[in-house]
Image: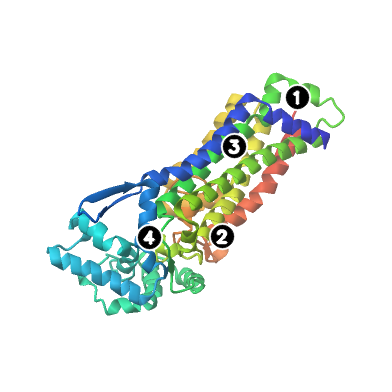
Amino acid sequence: MRIFTLEIKKIIKTRVTWILLLAALALSVLMAYLPVTFEGLSYKAENGERVQLSGLAAIHYAKDAGASLSGAVTAKKIQTAVGEYQEALREYGVEDSFELPEDVYYDRLMIYQPFIHGVKEVFSDEKTGMAPGLLDIDPEEVGTFYERAPIRLENLMRMEGSRQSDIDKAEEMYREIETPFQYYEGVSGNSMDYQVLTIFLLTIICAVIVSPVFSMDYQTGADDILRCTKHGRLHLAVFKILAALVITGVTFLLCGVLWILTTNTLFGWESTKTSMQMLFSVSSLPALTIGELEWTNLLGSFLLFFSLMSLILFLSARIRNAAVALAAAMFFCILPIITYIGAPETLANWLQCLLPGGALGLNNSLLYAMTELDFLHPGGLSVWNVHLMFVIAALWIPVLLIGTVWSYCRRRG
């Protein structure tokens, strides 16, 4: 235990580590606050003048304006939303809402907007997937929204070339989702994007802290002395690993929780009861609210994060130069983003699951994976790629950590 304490102090007392840890905390708050600055709207005051609101003022006004529609997203509310949009479009002789005057949107349609994207998705063309114009939707048919949603899921997966076994598995998961959906004004899809960015930046920061754990001692020659001590091999390797994982793990979780608490305080805790399907695709498979999605994304990313930190420790134990170890760590942090963009879709999905930390990034993030309908087929089984990446990450961690200890103990000066 004394060795463990010394290793903790050794990592923490360096100036670079302190700077990075403080930067991580500041970054978490900043990433939670930035989406607030993008919020803006206008309303007509009693004297007839238009008042522009931004930031928290805009968030609070939108919450008050949409209070009457908060709660269960019933078929009647959806029909009302479609009816209001259609009335405005006909009144101004246009076919799409973006052609309407901005004032009309804020004064008449803003509170109904969250219901519209789901309607257009559910009533998309069964063969082409093209969303219909709002004027082409029969308000009476909108009442079948929740009956049509599973049909939309099946049609979408068939258009994407999914196997029947994939469709059956997806439909089984979809039946677990509670209906009617829930909606409360507040946390938006844009703010959730910043959780993705926060997790990626925290991963980069922690990778910088972990990469020199072994390689720096090799480079300075301190390792040659440490190996001559009583606990200079196996025990030292284990405690070095534990110290690095405790420091980075606590940092990752603390900053991730700080982001969630700050975001929900700014946007309103009531909005965490919104169904995931209301902010993302109606066909999203997880039966989660936004609050549950935030925690699932954080904890799931934490497992993937541990697999990547284990890989970086393994590299550190194999590389003699600290700068090269850092470069290797950065390469494996960025590699999943590159492969997800450049590789064919099926290969990209496999690499997202197989690479340690393969879903820690931007467009390849765990959050976006949870909104997709990607299934993989190990051994002929149909497995949602999110489930598979968790299993593989859990297998990578012991393999890489054992490899790290073995590499360190077997190393010769």
Which kind of residue does numbered mark 1 sit on? Asp
Q: Nearer the viewer, residue 282 or 56?
A: 56
Q: Earlier in the sequence, mark 1 or mark 2?
A: 1
Residue 83 higher or lower than 95, as above or below: below
Q: Identify the image quadrant of residue 283.
A: bottom left
Q: Which image quarter holds the N terminus?
A: top right
Image coords of residue 225 (percent x, y): 80, 22
Determine whether the residue tagged by mark 3 lies in a helix, strand or loop: helix
Residue reaching furthest to the front: 47
Q: Identify the image quadrant of residue 184.
A: bottom left
Which kind of residue does numbered mark 3 sit on? Cys
Q: Earlier in the sequence, mark 2 or mark 3?
A: 3
Q: Residues within 10 Å of mark 2 (few under 14, many from 20)?
A: few
Residue at the (56%, 55%) spot, across then down: 295
- Left or right: 115 as drawn, with respect to 379: left
Determine whether the residue tagged by mark 1 lies in a helix, strand or loop: helix
Please give the label number shown on residue 223.
1
CA gap, disc 4 to disc 1? 63 Å
User: Which residue in the structure is indicated by mark 3?
Assistant: 206
Q: Residues within 10 Å of mark 3 (few under 14, many from 20)?
A: many
Q: Nearer the viewer, residue 126 or 21?
A: 21
Determine whether the residue tagged by mark 2 lies in a helix, strand or loop: helix
Residue at the (27%, 70%) spot, across then down: 82
User: Which residue in the structure is indicated by mark 4?
Assistant: 64
Q: Earlier in the sequence, mark 2 or mark 4?
A: 4
From the image, state whether disc 4 or disc 1 is nearer to you: 4
User: Which residue in the structure is indicated by mark 2?
Assistant: 387
From the image, state whether disc 2 or disc 4 is nearer to you: 4
CA gap, disc 2 to disc 3? 25 Å
CA gap, disc 2 to disc 4? 39 Å
Q: Are marks 4 and 3 in contact (CB under 8 Å)?
A: no
